[in-house]
Structures are given as C-alpha cells and as structure tokens.
Image (cartoon, grey):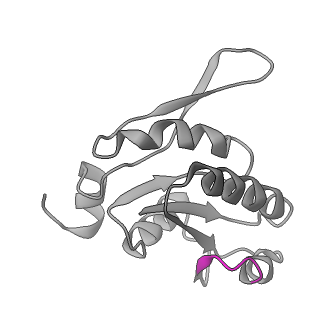
C-alpha cells in the first residue's frame, strides 16, 4: 500500500482537478493507495471541499507550515511506503507512477516542463518510512 500525502493550504481552486487527476492516475496504475490530505489551517473553503472527496483528511487548526504538514501526514499514514506531492499543479501525478515500481529505495523522479523540455525541480517522494527523514520525525529505527 502507498500513502500519498498532500499538504494543502488555501488550495480550494486546485483541489477538484488535482484529486481527479491523482485518483485517475493511481486507479489506472493498479497500485493500492490511500490519499491523505493535510489541511494546514486553510482559511478558504478547502476544509469543506476536502470533506466531500471521500479521502482521508487531517485538519490542522492553524497554519503550521509546509514542513509541519508533511510531518503530520507521515505520522498519520498507514503504510510503509509514502509519497508527498503538492496539489497546486507543480507536479504531474502521472510522474509519480513512473517511480513507484522501485519500492524499497529512496528515489527522486523528475518532471519535464511542457514548454522547455528540461527537467524541473525533483518530484518530492519518500519511498520508505525508515529513511532518515522519517526516523527523524517518528523516532523509529530501521
């Protein structure tokens, strides 16, 4: 099982399209997954919108920041394999599928910007709970 952590803050306009694209890509891949949205104290209608999606959602009462939202997502995940992706369109959910078959390794994929055909920032992915970051956050040892 793969837990996909999606930190969000005032992402009301982006959520419907992202959710449809993410679930479409994952359903097509055949990989067992759960989508875990972490609402980082949004002040728009993000909380109400997330509650209608049928996904797992953790709501933070106030904005704690991107890193804190990721930590909360890791602590609330239910699987050994994790991925972190933003819902603002920075990363294409279909790119996530390309690097998932390497379960057991920490890897970074790259997405290509449609206009430049050059690699952009790495897709943020953590493929093992026992990697350094996860040990730091959860105080676990491999």
Image position of 11 (left or right of 81)? right
Q: Position of residue 98 (x, y in %)?
A: 53, 36
Image position of 94 (left or right of 33)? right
Q: Nearer the viewer, residue 8 or 5?
A: 5
Q: Position of residue 57 (x, y in %)?
A: 60, 78
Q: Position of residue 107 (x, y in %)?
A: 38, 36
Quadrant location of residue 8?
bottom right
| Residue depicted at x 30% and y 52% | 128
| Residue depicted at x 24% and y 50% | 132
Quadrant location of residue 61?
bottom right
In the displayed structure, would residue 95 be above or below residue 45?
above
In the displayed structure, would residue 94 be above or below residue 41?
above
Q: Nearer the viewer, residue 98 or 17?
A: 98
In the displayed structure, would residue 57 be above or below residue 71?
below
Image position of 39 (left or right of 126)? right
Let me know if residue 55 is in the magenta part.
yes
| Residue depicted at x 30% and y 64% | 137
User: Which residue appears farthest toward the right when viewing the image?
Assistant: 13
Q: How would you classify the magenta stretch by its main secondary structure?
A: loop
| Residue depicted at x 13% and y 62% | 141
- Image quarter of the C terminus: bottom left
Quadrant location of residue 91?
top right
Let me know if residue 14 is in the magenta part.
no
**Magenta-drawn segment:** 52-57
């Amino acid at each position: 099982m793969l837990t996909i952590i999606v930190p969000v803050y005032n992402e009301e306009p982006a959520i419907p399209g992202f959710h449809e694209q993410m679930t479409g890509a994952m359903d097509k891949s055949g990989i067992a997954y759960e989508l875990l949205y972490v609402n980082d104290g949004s002040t728009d209608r993000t909380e109400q919108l997330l509650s209608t999606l049928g996904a797992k959602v953790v709501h933070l009462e106030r904005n704690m920041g991107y890193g804190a939202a990721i930590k909360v997502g890791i602590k609330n995940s239910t699987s050994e394999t994790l991925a972190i992706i933003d819902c603002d369109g920075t990363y294409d959910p279909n790119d996530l599928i390309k690097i998932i078959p390497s379960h057991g390794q920490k890897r970074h994929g790259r997405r290509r910007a449609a206009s430049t055909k050059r690699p952009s920032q790495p897709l943020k992915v953590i493929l093992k709970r026992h990697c350094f970051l996860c040990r730091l956050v959860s105080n676990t040892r491999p």
